[in-house]
Image (spheres, rainbow, N blue to C red):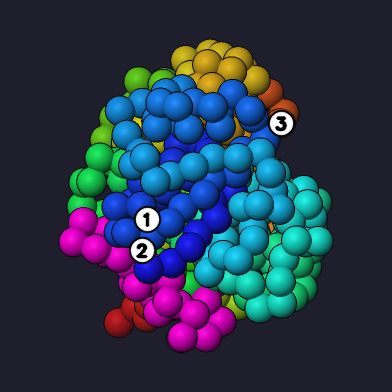
């Protein structure tokens, strides 16, 4: 069994803590909030962000970062992506050489366009970084519903270790060396999910959502391949799988925020009502910049950005998408 430090006590961190403790591992949770730590230590439940998921008595929580990092086989970073760099910076002085750190958040840093694993590696050069993501809502993982996810690492041994620690009969873990591709898919799907939610808020139907999902994964794949990701990754769990679940589920904070924006609320109003970090809002700017940097057409990402940052009405964005110049669906197919 492993000794694990969980950095983050939100819904996803709590769900993974429950999963890891259920596998027999020892888990210590870190939170900046004394109230969150007291809630977990006394009530064994994150009542605000994941009510109903009861943690075993063996799980403890602390505000002492040094303690949660000491003598751990694995550290899991489950903070929202905008706080990944500041979190890693604080962790650096307590991190031993070769320490395994698994990033489980989804996002791209706005200013640098770096993936979360690259941010952690830059801030903590002595560590060994892995990532884990896929179509996984905390609300379902935290109740034991069957789920599949992907662990990525630069070497097979590390990926297999993460797989072994997390996997059981209801939590299936695949492995891949394509950390870049899986993180691009995980981040940019949140932008498309915002668009899907906006379409729902506008009262559009399943046809519209199917178009957004299908053309959205085409955009994500183009960007990911240009950056060096593998095409196969975007047809898998961290690509089309994650996109489908995020666009379709009411557990998705990105879709819920999009619905509110489609109904006329501002992005700030929508985020306040959702009461959680809406990752797609932060990834939209990065997605647009990546498209520009690599010369990739990203019309859906661009329109979502225009709605969020330029106050463009969502209905106008949909109209402009529909009236774009005529295209082939697949460019490299030959006509007879």
Tell me which numbered mark, 2 or 1, is placed earlier along the sequence.
1
**Where residue 183 sits in the image (x, y, percent)?**
54, 62
Mark 2 to mark 1: distance in Å? 6 Å
> Can you tell which quarter of the image residue 114 is in?
bottom right
In the rendered image, the quadrant that contains the N terminus is bottom left
- The residue where tag 1 is placed is 20
Mark 2 falls on what kind of element?
Answer: helix
**Where residue 317 sits in the image (x, y, percent)?**
55, 32
Tell me which numbered mark, 2 or 3, is placed earlier along the sequence.
2
Would you say residue 67 sits in the magenta stretch? no
Q: Which stretch is magenta? A: 153-180
Q: Are circles 2 and 1 on residues that touch, CB within 8 Å? A: yes
Identify the mark at residue 166; answer none if there is no mark. 2
> Can you tell which quarter of the image residue 252 is in?
top left
Q: Residue at x 64, y 58 (%)?
A: 69
Tell me which numbered mark, 3 or 1, is placed earlier along the sequence.
1
**Where residue 130 sits in the image (x, y, percent)?**
55, 70
- The residue where tag 3 is placed is 309
């Amino acid at each position: 069994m492993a000794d694990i430090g969980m950095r983050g006590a939100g819904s996803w961190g709590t769900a993974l803590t429950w999963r890891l403790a259920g596998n027999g591992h020892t888990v210590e949770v870190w939170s900046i909030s004394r109230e969150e730590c007291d809630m977990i230590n006394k009530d064994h439940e994150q009542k605000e962000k994941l009510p109903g998921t009861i943690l075993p008595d063996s799980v403890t929580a602390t505000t002492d970062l040094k303690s949660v990092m000491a003598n751990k086989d694995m550290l899991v970073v489950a903070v929202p992506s905008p706080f990944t760099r500041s979190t890693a910076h604080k962790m650096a002085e307590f991190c031993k050489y070769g320490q395994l750190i698994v990033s489980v958040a989804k996002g791209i840093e706005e200013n640098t366009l770096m993936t979360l694993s690259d941010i952690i590696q830059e801030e903590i050069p002595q560590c060994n970084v892995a990532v884990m993501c896929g179509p996984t809502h905390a609300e379902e993982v935290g109740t034991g519903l069957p789920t599949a996810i992907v662990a990525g690492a630069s070497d097979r041994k590390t990926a297999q270790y993460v797989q072994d620690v997390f996997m059981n009969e209801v939590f299936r873990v695949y492995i891949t060396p394509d950390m870049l591709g899986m993180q691009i898919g995980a981040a940019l799907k949140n932008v498309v999910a915002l668009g899907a939610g906006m379409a729902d808020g506008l009262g559009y139907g399943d046809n519209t959502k199917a178009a957004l999902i299908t053309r959205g994964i085409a955009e994500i794949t183009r960007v990911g391949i240009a950056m060096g990701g593998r095409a196969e990754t975007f047809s898998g769990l961290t690509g089309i799988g994650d996109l489908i679940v995020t666009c379709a589920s009411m557990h998705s904070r990105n879709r819920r925020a999009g619905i509110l924006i489609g109904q006329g609320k501002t992005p700030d109003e929508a985020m306040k009502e959702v009461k959680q970090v809406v990752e797609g809002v932060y990834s939209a700017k990065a997605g647009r910049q990546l498209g520009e940097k690599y010369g990739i057409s990203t019309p859906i990402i661009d329109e979502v950005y225009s709605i969020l940052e330029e106050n463009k009405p969502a209905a106008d964005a949909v109209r402009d998408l529909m009236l774009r110049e005529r295209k082939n669906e697949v460019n490299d197919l030959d006509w007879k």
